[in-house]
Amino acid sequence: MISEKDFLIQFSGLKVGKHQFEYQIDKDFFNLFEYDEYNGADIVVKVLLNKKSTMLELSFQHKGTVNVPCDITNEDFDLPKKGNLSLLVKFGEEFNDENDAFLILPHGEFQMSVAQYIYEMIVLSVPQKRIHPGVKDGTLESPTLDYLSHQADEEPKEENKETDPRWDKLKQLLTDK
């Protein structure tokens, strides 16, 4: 079972310079945040920590796939995703994460969790509307798609409705300029 402790970086014992960390992200990781929109995930996250004497520079990169349902057909598919995130960590009097560009840790801190930043980076890289690639190129065969295309092929029935004469008078105002 995965826990947030697995994503702690202890920077106090590290030498000044660059250090790389790698994390394998799967469905269990998203369960930590009670996020259940993905059926599965297979993502590799690389974190490059550049330790300087007064601050830390973190560079996150991820690449992999998340298994999501298509918004049109509800068929599950693997959506390839990649992205990056940069974070600057400064030291100050008290913890402050209100700014997206940098984080302030208290002077006595010796470690930090990168789980929240990995989570946000991945979730924000997945689009709101998820469409199966087979829908776009026409290769997916699905009962839902067949039904939708059948509905689109039917000609809409025109009903003979009389319009309210008051609306006709208002429409005439637009055309009588």
Image (cartoon, rainbow, N blue to C red):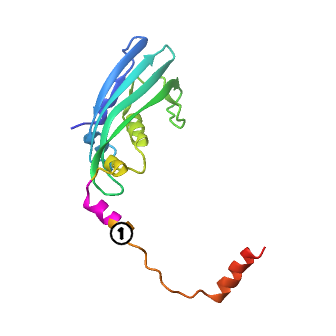
Q: 177 and 122: which one is in front? A: 177
- Asked if 144 appears above or below 16 in the picture, the reply is below
Q: Is residue 34 above or below residue 107?
A: below
The span shown in magenta is: 141-149
Q: How many marks?
A: 1
- Prevailing SS of the magenta stretch: helix
The foreground one among 28 and 112 is 28
Give the x, y percent position of residue 172: 71, 80
31 left or right, relative to 167: left
Position of 26 with respect to 53 (left or right) is left
Relative image position of residue 64 (x, y in whole percent): 31, 34
* Viewer can see residue 36: no
Q: Residues within 10 Å of mark 1 (few under 14, many from 20)?
A: few
* Rendering coords of residue 138 (x, y %): 33, 51
Classify the position of the N terminus by image quarter.
top left
Percent across and percent down for residue 79 are 33, 42
Above or below residue 60? Residue 159 is: below
Residue for point 51% across, 16% down? 54
In the displayed structure, 141 sits above or below 31; it is below
- Image quadrant in which you'd find residue 9: top left
- Point 39% across, 28% down: residue: 61
Q: Amino acid at mark 1?
A: Gln
The residue shown at (29%, 50%) is 139
The answer to if 26 sits in the magenta stretch is no
Query: Is label 1 in a helix, a strand or a loop?
Result: helix
Q: Residue at x 28, y 52 (%)?
A: 140
Q: Nearer the viewer, residue 114 or 155?
A: 155
For disc 1, the marked residue is 151
Q: Residue furthest right?
A: 177
Location of the C terminus by quadrant is bottom right
- Residue 147 is inside the magenta segment: yes
